Image (cartoon, rainbow, N blue to C red):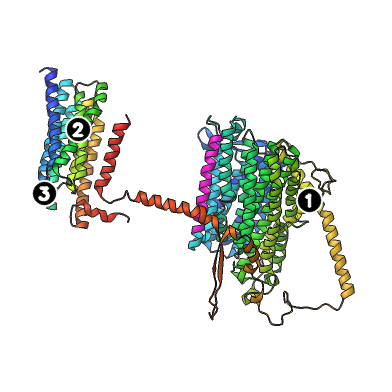
């Protein structure tokens, strides 16, 4: 190792160790809150930023590898930092820095023990994710993967005194481990029967199409469980409302992306072939997930549950993009595969920033008001302007409005869809317009969801008089949100530069990068005649038109401006309860997509003096898949319980019969 | 005496051991059971001594002495004292009727001989034909444990099973190394002491040594 310019992988490994050291220190500093809050947690946030730096160096520079003096005898942990790992490290570090700064302000109200435990698990969680991205053999990967899953389980159950939180944590842990078993089997298939579990070896392993497909399906299942692909999504809407907001932000923004990383790593890097039907499968699952997620997001009335469903939608879009890349790549359409892959990667980093921003925004609101229920919020913008304006940036970004970042990636993905008539398989050609339509529908519904989310929380009047006293975010919280919002804006305004940075990743995975036919200002993925986009020009025009309109209105209508309560609608007597509610806003979607869900309503009697309404739209898949499995497991364990008579003679007979059986048949 | 005569005597003693196992299966009284157990131990010790003398395996003398000391003297004495303290001189009842149990026992013996035949052909010792008897007495002792409802007969069944294993060891391989035998003997001794303490606790909790009361301990 050259000390003057160390390899990025060594730097990244050092930072991961540093994070583990922070985690190990924090329980001993339980009674020193100031040290935890002023030294350890800022150091953790800065370490995350340094990880992003190391990732950037790996993204732009040479691939570097490292074998650690750790692990089992003859089976050391191997790390490697190539462009793909580097890109995801940038994603991890960039978003985790903002969330970490925010958490520094947010976590101040925790008691000593909870704060120290949070500090322990949070930094282990970050280190685990970084090691997942760096791992270069199956052993190190699985160890890091489990470290990530277990530490995030403890983060989800931070408020473990509440039974619902423990239940959510258990569900998460269960699905995470079912997925991990699938991954273990996947690596078992990938090594091709030679017993070498390093990724370097797997890259060279020659699998038959059958075994390659088995490996791919296992990877899709395992990583799908972590990402929240339908029907393995059920833990997400339970875990996110249970977890503290910064944890939700990291889990949704970053941890779900490690599953996308794993899918890309296994499918394009480790497997020696890519088949088109894998892509069709992934595309179909992704589209179903996207639509399912956004429809359920539209009918939620808990703000964190709404964001969790929205994360499921975004994962669906990412997996659909991944599937499209596979289809193009298997068909030999390199340039189109490059567009789809670029759009997928771009959307992954975008989602990390805007979903992180939205989750910490809801955290600030929850902290100030103590309410997660949209039905008891409203008009928060007036008491919390910082949070409201910064969240607005995230809302516009996730809704896919230019010039913010959400638009660029969704636009690129749709461009990729529009190019598909070039495919050689005609039946896929026929399916693609349906898929493009679904993506467009999901995007439009996502915008609808965000109007509901923002409008019901921040706009209108206070549904509860206490909301007027809500305090705005503290300094550290504002700083964290500003960083994430700035990320959303920067990623939106500089698509050409971002795509240039993504080129090494696409080169690594599919051997081709996205050609930009435009200039530094204009992004034109295929050629400039077909489609081009320049957010800077767009922003300038929008700003100019707005200013012009403002000046004109001021000049022409000056003095005739009338002030009125917002959403007054001309009624002289109205109460805050007469505003449109979250349930009311979601009603049309509930009506249209009623076949997706089981609606349970409790309508009050007309003569009830104190009427109480409650309604819930429940996930049909839970009743269709998970409840039967749970009942089957319960039934099986009941049957096994019958073996327990409490009579010692029966136990002796069991051993006797086993003995006789073995003697007679196992000769 | 010639080698074949020794073999005859060893076979006779082994057959006696099997016969005692059948007798234990049908014995209803605890006191009788303990006496039979002591006789079984004696038969085992005698056959071990004869094998030791005829083959010149000197460490088998120690094994035989250990058997006499533990299984013929110490444990029966311990059990007699125990049933006096526990006031358990009563009759023991069996779960099934005795003829059925005997028939099942005969089937087990046939099974054991059938099973032991190919194994004893591979064994190079003079006493290899005893292997079937040893396995049969292990299975019979197991059967006795199953058919008894009281705690003390079960423990005696367990110890009788150990007798059968010991016979198998002498017949197939001229005994285990002495260290192993010492270890096993110590284990049996400690096990019996612990079970003796358990007897008191079981009686204190359920007012009886009948194991059917333990059914109430199951989860549902």
User: Which of the marked residues, 2 or 3, is nearer the chain's N terminus?
Assistant: 3
Q: Chain of mark 3?
A: B
Up-down relation of residue A68 to residue A360 (above or below): above
> Residue shown at 60%/40% (left/top)?
A135
Does the magenta segment cover residue A174?
Answer: yes
> Residue shown at 68%/74% (left/top)?
A461
Disc 1: which residue: A494
What residue range appears in magenta?
A167-190
Disc 3: which residue: B91
- Under circle 2, the secondary element is helix
> Horizontal and vertical percent for residue B160?
18, 38
Question: Badge 1: how crowded within 10 Å, few (<14), some, or many (20+)?
Answer: many
Q: Quadrant of the C terminus of chain A?
A: top left
Quadrant of the rendered structure where residue A41 is?
A: bottom right
The mark closer to the camera, 2 or 3, is 2
Of B4 and A74, which appears nearest the observer?
Answer: B4
């Amino acid at each position: 190792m050259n000390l003057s310019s160390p390899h990025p992988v060594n730097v990244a490994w050092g930072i991961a160790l540093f994070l583990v050291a922070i985690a190990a220190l924090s329980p001993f500093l339980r009674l020193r809150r100031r040290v935890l809050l002023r030294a350890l947690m800022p150091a953790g946030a800065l370490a995350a930023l340094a990880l992003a730096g190391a990732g950037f160096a790996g993204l732009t520079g040479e691939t570097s590898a490292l074998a650690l003096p750790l692990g089992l005898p003859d089976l050391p942990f191997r790390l490697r930092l190539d462009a793909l790992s580097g890109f995801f490290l940038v994603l991890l570090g960039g978003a985790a820095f903002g969330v970490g700064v925010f958490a520094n302000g947010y976590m101040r109200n925790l008691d000593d023990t909870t704060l120290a435990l949070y500090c322990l698990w949070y930094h282990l969680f970050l280190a685990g994710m970084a090691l997942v991205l760096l791992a270069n053999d199956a052993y190190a990967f699985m160890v890091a993967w489990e470290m990530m899953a277990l530490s995030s389980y403890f983060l989800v159950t931070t408020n473990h005194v509440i039974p619902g939180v423990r239940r959510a944590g258990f569900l998460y842990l269960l699905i995470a481990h079912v997925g991990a078993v699938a991954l273990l089997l996947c690596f078992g298939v990938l090594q091709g029967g030679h017993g070498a579990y390093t990724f370097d070896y797997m890259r060279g392993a020659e699998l038959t199409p059958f075994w390659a497909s088995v490996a791919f399906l296992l990877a899709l299942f395992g990583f799908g469980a972590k990402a929240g692909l339908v029907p393995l999504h059920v833990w997400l809407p339970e875990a996110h409302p249970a977890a503290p907001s910064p944890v939700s932000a990291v889990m949704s923004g970053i941890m779900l992306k490690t599953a996308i990383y794993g899918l890309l790593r296994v499918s394009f890097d480790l497997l020696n072939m890519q088949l088109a039907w894998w892509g069709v499968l992934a595309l179909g699952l992704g589209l179903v997930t996207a639509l399912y997620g956004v429809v359920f997001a539209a009918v939620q009335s808990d703000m964190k549950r709404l964001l969790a469903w929205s994360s499921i939608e975004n994962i669906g879009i990412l997996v659909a993009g991944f599937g499209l890349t596979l289809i193009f790549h298997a068909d030999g359409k390199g340039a189109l595969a490059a567009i789809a892959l670029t759009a997928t990667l771009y959307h992954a980093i975008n989602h990390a920033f805007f979903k992180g921003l939205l989750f910490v925004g809801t955290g600030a609101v929850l902290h100030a008001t103590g309410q997660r229920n949209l039905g008891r919020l409203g008009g928060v913008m007036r008491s919390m302007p910082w949070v409201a304006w910064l969240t607005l940036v995230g809302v516009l970004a996730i809704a896919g409005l230019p010039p913010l970042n959400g638009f660029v990636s969704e636009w690129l993905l749709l461009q990729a869809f529009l190019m598909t008539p070039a495919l050689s398989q005609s039946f896929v050609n026929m399916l693609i317009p349906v898929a493009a339509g679904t993506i467009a529908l999901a995007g439009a519904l996502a915008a609808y969801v965000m109007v509901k989310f923002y409008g019901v929380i921040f706009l209108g009047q206070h549904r509860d008089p206490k909301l007027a006293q809500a305090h705005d975010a503290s300094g550290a919280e504002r700083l964290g949100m500003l960083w994430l919002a700035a990320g959303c804006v920067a990623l939106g305004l500089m698509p050409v530069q971002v795509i240039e940075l993504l080129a090494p990743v696409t080169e690594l995975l599919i051997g081709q990068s996205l050609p930009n036919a435009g200039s530094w200002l204009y992004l034109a993925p295929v050629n400039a005649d077909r489609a081009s986009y320049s957010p800077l020009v767009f922003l300038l025009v929008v700003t100019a038109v707005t200013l012009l309109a403002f000046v004109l209105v001021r000049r022409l209508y000056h003095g005739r401006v009338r002030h009125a309560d917002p959403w007054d609608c001309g009624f002289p007597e109205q109460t805050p309860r007469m505003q449109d509610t979250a349930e009311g806003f979601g009603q049309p979607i509930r009506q249209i997509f009623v076949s997706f869900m089981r609606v349970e309503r409790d309508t009050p009697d007309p003569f009830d003096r104190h009427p109480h309404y409650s309604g819930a739209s429940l996930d049909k898949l839970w009743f269709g898949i998970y409840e039967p499995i749970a009942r089957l497991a319960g039934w099986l364990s009941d049957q096994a319980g019958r073996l327990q008579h409490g009579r010692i003679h029966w136990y002796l007979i069991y051993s006797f019969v086993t003995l006789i059986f073995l003697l007679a048949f196992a000769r | 005496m010639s080698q074949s005569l020794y073999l005859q005597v060893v076979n006779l003693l082994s057959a006696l051991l099997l016969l005692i196992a059948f007798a234990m299966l049908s014995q209803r009284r605890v006191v009788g059971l303990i006496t039979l157990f002591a006789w079984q131990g004696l038969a085992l010790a005698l056959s071990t001594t004869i094998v030791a003398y005829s083959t010149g395996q000197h460490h088998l003398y120690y094994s035989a002495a250990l058997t006499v000391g533990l299984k013929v003297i110490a444990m029966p004495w311990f059990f007699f004292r125990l049933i006096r303290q526990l006031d358990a001189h009563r009759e023991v009842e069996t779960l099934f009727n005795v003829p059925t149990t005997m028939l099942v026992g005969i089937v087990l013996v046939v099974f054991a001989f059938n099973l032991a035949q190919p194994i004893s052909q591979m064994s190079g010792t003079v006493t290899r034909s005893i292997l079937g008897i040893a396995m049969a007495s292990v299975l019979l002792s197991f059967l006795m444990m199953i058919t008894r409802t009281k705690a003390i007969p079960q423990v005696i069944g367990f110890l009788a099973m150990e007798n059968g294993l010991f016979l198998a060891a002498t017949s197939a391989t001229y005994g285990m190394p002495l260290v192993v035998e010492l270890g096993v003997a110590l284990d049996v001794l400690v096990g019996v002491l612990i079970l003796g303490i358990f007897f008191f606790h079981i009686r204190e909790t359920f007012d009886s040594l009948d194991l059917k009361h333990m059914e109430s301990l199951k989860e549902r």
